[in-house]
Amino acid sequence: MTLLLLAWLGCADAPRPGADAPPARPSATDPLAAVAPLDAPRLLRRISLDLRGVVPTVAELDTVEADPTQVDVLRDAWLDDPRLEQRLVEMLAEQWQTRIDEFDARWYDYPLTARDEFTFDQSVGEEPLRLMARVAMEDRPWSDTVTSDETMVNPMLLSIWPVEAIEDGDGWRAGRYTDGRPAAGVLTTNGLWWRYSSSPFNLGRSRAAAMLKHLLCEDFLARSVSFAPAEATTTESGTANAALGEPYCMACHAAIEPLAATTFGFWWRTQYSAIEMSTYHAEREPLGPEALDVVPAYFGARVNGLADLGAHVAADPHFHRCAVETAGAMLLRRPLTPADHDRVDLWLADYHAAGDRYKVALRAITDDPLYRAGAVADDAPDALHARARTERLLSVDQMQSSLEDLAGFRWSFAGFDQLGVDTVGYRVLGGGVDGQTVVRPQPEPNLTWALVVERLAQASAWSLVRQELEGAGDGGEAPARLLAGVTPDSRPGDADFRDALRGLHWRLYAVRADDGWVDAVEALWGEALVREGSPAGAWRVVLSALLRDPLWVST
Amino acid sequence: MIPSARPSRRSLLQLGALGLGAAGALGGLSRSARASTSGERRFLFVFCRGGWDPACVLAPQFGTDAVDVEPDASPATSGGLDWVDHPERPSVRRWFEQHHARAAIVRGFEVQSVSHERCAKLLMTGRPDEGRDDWGAMLAAASAEARALPYLVLGGPSFTALHADQVVRSGSNGQLAALLDGGAITLQSDRPALLPTVAGDRLADAFVRNRAAALEATGRSLLNRDLARRYGQALDRIDLLSASGLDLSQPPGGGDRWSTFSTALDALEAGASRCVAVEYDGLWSQTWDTHSAGHMQSYHWEELFQYLLRLSDELGRRPGLLEDRLQDEVTVVVYSEMGRGPRLNSTAGKDHFTYTSALLFGGGIAGGRIVGGYTDTGFGRPTDVRTGGAGDTPLLAAHLGATLLTLGDIDPLSVGIESPAIEALLA
């Protein structure tokens, strides 16, 4: 059987990108002509994982295999799938980087227990992301994200902050602050400013930089700053005041300071004080202009507080372009470059035509050849290979949600989501973003990623076998049936056994299995039975291998 | 958190039984396999989080009203190095007295930002954006050796663009060890899973490896094949790591930080890593970011040098792969993402400053050298990178990076670094 396993080496059933339309040679007039799309089932899998966090059902795969045009029909339906809200939170988290492990205020500053630690940090970090996701899900204009008087609350936030729920429910739902803060969407969420805090020395400048980066895609911190030109004008107080008087510094600070001056309602007299941090301080708004010696303004236009700032941001074309660019980076799983501007123009046109609706941008992006790339001609320019990412590793969030859906296993421990935290968990080691030292999802396998994939696959295989072959439900919801037709008595060679394997391949990878693969897995199962001593053990080995497959871990 | 005495299931694997020839093809990590190594220079990065004040130790700036120095500090000299002595910092004094001949100081180079995150990127990549790997990742990627942990990050930031596959983060609570021995899902899960047997796991490993190899051979796109190749490499590295016997179980953060240095030394000694990064975030993990309470800088420097003393002793005691001592093969880089301004602020601290200094010692470093310097107003002084004395070149972090790459036999230009290496630092 080992020989059979090894002989199958050359029979890998790679996805069939462009099976009917292989990539053309690069063209000077149409660079994307060298990009061939994924075939329909595999494309459906990519879209499903991006929009729902799970792989398609067998019925869905069958549908698009029979009629590839159904991909778009299903995609449109999934844009209204409730699971998209969670996916938006996860994808926005990679961009906004608010889901950090520890804020300046900690769970023990409130009447909470140690078991609440993860929920506390997660709730705070997700607040602004949830608001953006809700605006998108409800098809409201994206400007609502910076003008709304609502936020999102859950039981944790209801217990620690001055907020109230304005809709029924048990989990995340719409809410409002009750401390009289201005209506400016994410700009007046505690979650955003807990993540991007300031200090008595920084005077809100870092918050202004965060606004510019995330709302306008203007990363002022990426600009080089040399103090050399300031040497001649150094004052008795050192360089602290150079930003206000040195022309070289003012190139950036002329925009930064007036924005920073709007944030003093979030000015905390004492850092690390939960009391200070939980509540908005309207009475401190005048401190900003005084401390920074500027008039609050948005690129030269005077503003009166955060609500007015939000209105100015909402009216800025750069804000909308940035929103669409960010969506593109989320779905293409890479930063956008100037070479992508023509694509952004197309997405943005659809977005504006629909009244600045985010889901329309998502639709346009998932229509794009760059998103649907399955193969690029080998002799295409390197830049095109970099733009058209034909393979994307599953994010840690996608790994978790898809396996929870299939196998009923969620990796949690003592209140922590093990793939959502780094102090005790495996988020970054699994390729994720911690928002502080790691700010980009890992694009390729490395050692720790492979180990996380392996352990998650083993735990999921154990859970799946336990529930589907050993009849132990562990109290969780029944997962989708993966081993349909398999019983403890099923053996390699049985028609049902081989059908089950083919079904697994189809469901897990969205690719039809060939006989070589089925033979190899039967061989693996047989050897595993000898080693493990039971059919359940053999299935655990087989499933743990299949859930680590290159076709599983990528889209 | 993870019992280190628990036998590692993977450590039971016999590489030969995998039928992959991994040990022979990739080079081993055990001492018996050292003859296969090339003796490439290896690097230990010590990142001091928060922005240190070089005027406390590395950069004497006495005799000018433009720079505030500690009241009891005094200038000192050891060999060719001048530095700042202080009664409360005996470890600093001892270190310079003992190790000055192997050490060099780069003074007054500029990290062109005042944001901690961007300064760290600049310090470690030469750029403020995400477009370049850090020095450690580049050095690891250029290694001719197949190593289990090419760039082991035990602490501090790391930045990658093209070489994310080279970086292995350990986690702050022994996560890497828990992944290796399976404790991650048998002990750290609300639903502890039953692991396959060693033999069963070996079967699954081989199956996955074959799938990756087949995809690498037949994938329809370059990226498809490249990902498969890197997946296969990651699996190989797991096997190499398991066979190495390295103990990667660290105590929780805030415990005995020497254990982190010790793990770093183990990885370098075994040849498992070309680069290792550790973080020293100050006494009681208070960080070096002393906008107020500037006196804490002194405590941080003293404790840092306690670790450096022990580190230097260990480097001088442990054998190298080809040289007699590890200290001849490993270059140690001690740096912080930014400096602190020349003047005290109103709360007895110093604010962010783009000019800073770094300490380098060990293999490849021209000992007893000072490179660069400060003006009377506390700003970086243009330098002659060939001699290290006054010149025309404003030193940047990229110059430091180019020097490290050169020490690692990488032409800086080949990886897009246009700043020249600081020749004066090269032994």
Image (cartoon, coloured by chain):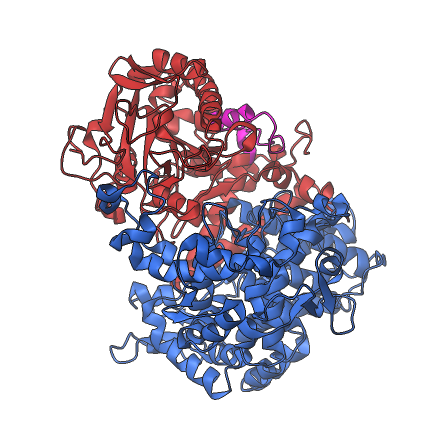
Q: Which chain is red?
A: B
Q: Residue at x 55, y 41 (%)?
A: B18
- Note whether residue A36 is visible: yes
Q: Residue at x 77, y 45 (%)?
A: A113
Q: Position of residue A176 (x, y in %)?
A: 68, 69
Asked if the stretch drawn in magenta spans residue A506, the answer is no
The front one of A176 and B399 is A176
The colour of chain A is blue
Q: Residue at x 44, y 35 (%)?
A: B24
Q: Position of residue A107 (x, y in %)?
A: 70, 47
* Residue B249 in the figure: left or right of residue B150: right
Asked if the stretch drawn in magenta spans residue B265, the answer is yes
* Res. A124 image quadrant: bottom right
Q: Position of residue B339 (x, y in %)?
A: 36, 36
The front one of A379 and A411 is A411
In the image, the segment drawn in magenta is B242-266
Q: Is B373 located above or below residue A417 in the figure? A: above
